[in-house]
Structure formats: structure tokens, C-alpha cells
Image (tube, helix red, strand yellow):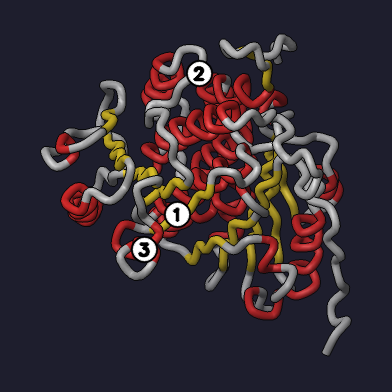
Amino acid sequence: MNETLAANTSGTQTWTEEEIRQQPTSWMTALHHLDNQRAELDDWLNTFYAQPGGKIILTGAGSSAFIGDIIAPCLARQLQANVVAIPTTDLVTNPMDYFHAEQPLLLVSFARSGNSPESVAAVQLANQFVANCRHLIITCNATGDLYHYACEHDNARVRLMPAETHDRGFAMTSSISTMMLSCLAIFAPQLFNSHSFASVAACCEAIIASHGDFSQSAFGDLNWRRVVYLGSGGLQGAARESALKVLELTAGQLAAFYESPVGFRHGPKSLVDDETLVVVFVSSHPYTRQYDLDLLAELHRENIALRVVAISDTPATVMEAGPHLYLPASRTFNDIELAFCFLVYAQIFALTASLKAGITPDTPSASGTVNRVVQGVVIHSWPEVR
């Protein structure tokens, strides 16, 4: 990794900016590494698939959990299997609701550091509850507890991401996107591989280049006090991660929310006022897209928000009635591929919002109330309380 920190025009140097910029290169590196490891991993996975009634849980904490929100629907459809996303923060508090003794389980753990208390506890609880339990650890840290667990236990395998994705900044950027891509490539290699994904990486490289020194975001620079991200299906997971980036990097000074475009009408829409930025992640699926564009047209008619920005890879008349972003020219992307592009826009926006607020993005929590690796979590043994 380049040891020279990235700099913006304000003179502030941040690892966060460097880690946003490095993503397209890191993605392709991870995919090429996976190409060399595929045969052994495929054999291991096939023995799991051969068991009837198996369940795959995608898990992690914070941004790592949102990986599952984004990709679980796609993987369930591709594998025609029971694939669900459940955060470690839920698994450790309510293991009895998610682990079933006689149901074969593959627990896929996403972890930047692999040292979060909940991540380690979720693995231990899964082993305790499930007789036939396997673990796939996808992590960025070769010295983390989860990495060492996978190396020492026969029921586990580990895939280590490129070293530079063990983000030094507080917020997860290259770590979340590279782990997400690697999981997709592991379970759906026919769709996600070094050949097919090159166009997505090139598109994101162009998005990053278009932002120059990152002194401004593509959403504009108005005096908004809250931001709302909207997306359907897996793009709702991308909206959730985008909202978290704003909260993290502005230390909560800019309030951020997420929803689906259809769900937004059922109460959350009441938060929109003349200090609100709304960002709509428009689906590429022709059916789902209709709902996204319907809400976009509604927001334009009502004209309550300070700004409504739509992002899409294909044009639509309703989008051109207001601020909008079309992705750099490329082939048509599916929604999971779009998620990578949309997340890059959201990461850059969160970084610029952080700098505008006078916050140091690498260490936004001056009070220390939140930390890069979560602290203060007491893990209770099962069954400690009956």
C-alpha cells in the first residue's frame, strides 16, 4: 500500500480518501487471488450443498452486516437455496431464534478486523447450537481472531482480502466492498469473476476520477441537515450502508436515514423538509424500476425536499425533471453491480460532508464513544440466564 496519505485541497490528509480511491484495483486483485483458490473451495462448498435442508447465514456487525442485506436476495436466487442475512449483533443476543440443531449450517462471517466480540461469539454459538456447522470467514486481517480460528479448525475455511483493504480509517470503505465482491465471486462465479466485473471496476474508477480532489460531492453542497437514501431490494441494503457512512464520518452531525421507495411512504417520508437531501438509487430491473421512478416523480411534484438526486445507469424522463446522475458509459449493470457504483458515490459524499463539518474522517468520534473495533460489549455464556 502507498504509505503517502491522500490529500484534498483543504490540506487535510486522510486514509479514508486513499481507501475509497483504491477500491477498483483492490477488487480486481481479490478476484485474481480467488481464481487461484477456487478448486479447493468449490470442493468444500459442494459437500455442503449436497446435504438436504442446509442454511447459509451471511453475518457481520455494522457495515459488515449490510453486505448480507445487499447480496443475500441475489445469492438465494442464484443458488436456489436458503440464504439469509442476520447480523452478529442479533445472533449473539438471540441465538435460539436463528440456530437449529439439526439443520446443516454454513455461517459466512464478514469481518474487517475479525476481532469484534460479537463476531467471535457468533462463531462459538453456532458451533454450540448446530451439530453440523461450517464456517467461511471472509476477512481483511491476517492477525485477527477469526482468521486464526479458521486456520485452526477443520470445519472452517478463510479467504483473506488484499492487505490494503484492512482499512486504517474509522469507516469501512474498501473493506466492505471487497469482502462483498469476494463473497459474490465465491458463490456465484458465473456472474462475478475477474472478466465480467472488469467493466464495473472501470465504471467506478471513472466515478472516482470525476470527483477530482474530493473537495465536492456529485450531490451538491447545500446546507442540508439530513440525508435520506432510498433503494429497492438489495439496493435498500446499499442505502442502509450509505446512511451509516454519513452518520459515522460526520459523527452524527448530519442525520441520515434509509428506506425502500415504497416503504418510504408509510411514515418515514414525514422527515422530509426543506433541509433534506434525498438520494434515490434507481434499480436496473424493469419491474422494480417502475416503483423507484414513481416515488421520484412524487417527490418532484411535492417539491418539499431541499434536493432530490436520482442515480441510474440508464436514462428516464422522470429523472431529468430534477438533479440526476447517470453512471459513466458502460454495459447495463444488474442491481448488485449497481450497488458498487452507488456506494462509491455515497462514500465520497460522506467524506466531503465530514470535511465540511470540520471533522477528521479517519477519527471522527473525538469523544471516543464509538471505535474502529467496537468496545464495551460483554458476551454472556449460553445458557447463563433462563
* Residue 70 visible in the shown view: no
Question: Between tags 2 and 3, which lies in front?
Answer: 3
Residue 256, horizontal then vertical, whole percent = 50, 49
Q: Earlier in the sequence, mark 1 or mark 2?
A: 2
Q: Residue at label 3? A: 270
Q: How many C-alpha atoms fall within 10 Å of the one at disc 3: few (<14), some, or many (≥20)? A: few
- Taking the image as drawn, is residue 333 in sight? yes
User: Which residue lies most toward the bottom here?
Assistant: 386
Labels 1 and 3 touching (C-beta < 8 A)? no
Residue under the image location 83 percent in, 41 percent down: 144
Q: Which amino acid does the dot numbered 2 rest on?
A: Ser
Left/right placement of residue 248 relative to residue 377 reads left
- In the rendered view, does 379 fall on the left or right side of 286? right
Q: Secondary structure at mark 1?
A: strand
Query: Looking at the image, is 350 positioned above or below residue 194?
Result: below
Mark 2 lies on a secondary structure that is: loop
The residue nearer to you, when weighing 292 against 267, is: 267
Q: Quadrant of residue 379?
A: bottom right
Amino acid carrying mark 1 in the image: Tyr
Question: Is 105 rendered above or below residue 33?
Answer: below
Q: Quadrant of the C terminus?
A: bottom right
Q: Residue at x 26, y 21 (%)?
A: 329
User: In the rendered structure, which amino acid carries the disc numbered 3?
Assistant: Ser
> Mark 3 or mark 2, which is nearer the start of the sequence?
2
Residue shown at 63%/61% (left/top)?
87
Disc 1 marks which residue?
Answer: 258
Residue drawn at the location 56% of the way across and 47% of the way down: 244
Give the CA distance from mark 1 to mark 2.
Answer: 25 Å
